[in-house]
Amino acid sequence: MTVSLSCSTTSAARSPTTPTRRAGSEACALAALPNVAAKVSGLTSGLTPGRWTADDLRGIVDTAVEAFGPDRLLYGSDWPLAELGGGAPAWREAFDALVAGLSTSERDAMLGGNAARVYSVG
């Protein structure tokens, strides 16, 4: 299941009791804990191939970066489920476009360095 992450209270047409709002608030509360990291994954598996763009995912990715910071956020390919939404390469291309404004070291951390640190590998 994909849950939208929203730390904002300004999401249009959402009441504070909707599952999306509650899950977003809980995720943002977790982001306040310095020992918690998050993985950005599963955003395209429920989407129709060819009918979504990186901009459709911008809100959730930007919110995740804002909440957790690039030093506690991990990219997940979501393979093989990403194939349902157009493929892992399409998701990676979208992710790269969405984090293009970050520094090279921040992008590298999200694409593998953070995972190595969090999972104590490498």
Image (cartoon, rainbow, N blue to C red):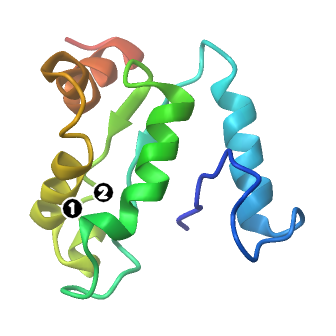
26 vs 77, left or right, is: right
Task: Answer above or below: position of 114 versus 21.
Answer: above
User: Measuring 72% from the left and 58% from the top, which residue is drawn there?
Assistant: 10
> Nearest the camera: 49 or 98?
98
Give the x, y percent position of residue 31: 63, 28
Identity of the amino acid at label 2?
A: Asp
Q: Which residue is mark 1?
A: 91
The 10 Å Cα crowd at callout 2, few under 14, some 14 to 19, many 20 or more, is: some
User: Measuring 24% from the left and 29% from the top, which residue is drawn there?
Assistant: 102
User: Measuring 28% from the left and 29% from the top, which residue is drawn there?
Assistant: 110
Q: Which label's residue is closer to the chain start, 2 or 1? A: 2
Task: Answer above or below: position of 56 versus 92.
Answer: below
Task: Answer above or below: position of 75 versus 118.
Answer: below
Quadrant holding the C terminus: top left
101 vs 7, left or right, is: left
Give the x, y percent position of residue 21: 76, 60
User: Total number of numbered labels?
Assistant: 2
Identity of the amino acid at label 1?
A: Trp
Quadrant holding the N terminus: bottom right
Give the x, y percent position of residue 44: 34, 70
35 vs 54, left or right, is: right
Task: Answer above or below: position of 66 versus 36.
Answer: below
Q: Which residue is mark 2?
A: 78
38 vs 48, left or right, is: right
Q: Residue 58 sits in which quadrant?
A: bottom left
Are the residues flagged by discs 2 and 1 in contact, CB closer than 8 Å?
Answer: yes
Give the x, y percent position of residue 12: 70, 71
Q: Residue 90 sits in which quadrant?
A: bottom left
